[in-house]
Amino acid sequence: MLNPITRPLAGLMPWWVVLETTGRRTGRMRRTPLANGPFDGSSIVLLSVHGDRSAFARNIADAPHVRVKRRGRWHSGTASVVEPDDATLRRFSGYARLGYRTVGDNPKFIRVELDGVASASR
């Protein structure tokens, strides 16, 4: 319900990003606004408050290559659905943590490893 309202601002405002996935049935690009999460230069973590039942998480399971629009720039990468942990959750904004705790239904993290970026921890 909120996605059509927030989509134009997501990816530009610092607290939102746009996750672009490929529809598992249609093959069309699907864009979803999400809370901006921890970004270390080689990966970004996003929050799926409805866990792996959300449409974009199911799209990722079928086609993990995604794009993320963050602060006006598109980044491509490979996404995976991972279990949340408290240390990473603390790095999200209060807005995201509130959603995690109030509307979260088996929440998961979406970790996007960015293409062409070497990580010291790999």
Image (cartoon, rainbow, N blue to C red):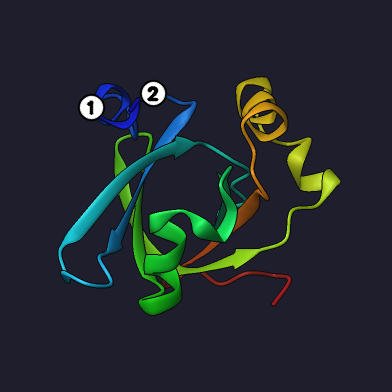
Q: Quadrant of the C terminus?
A: bottom right
Q: In the image, residue 65 lies at what x, y percent?
A: 36, 72
Does dot 1 land on a helix, a strand or a loop? loop
With respect to residue 92, does 41 lie above or below? below
Amino acid type assigned to the residue bearing label 2 in the image: Met
Residue at 75% across, 41% down: 89
Q: In the image, residue 54 lies at what x, y percent?
A: 46, 53
In the rendered image, which quarter is residue 30 located in? bottom left
Judge whether residue 42 can be spotted in this image: no
Amino acid type assigned to the residue bearing label 1 in the image: Pro
Q: In the image, residue 52 lies at what x, y percent?
A: 55, 61
With respect to residue 80, does 92 lie above or below? above
Q: Is residue 35 left or right of residue 94?
A: left
Residue at 73% across, 36% down: 91
Q: Is residue 101 left or right of residue 47?
A: right
- Say if mark 2 contacts mark 1, CB within 8 Å: no
Mark 2 — residue?
13
Residue at 22% across, 72% down: 25
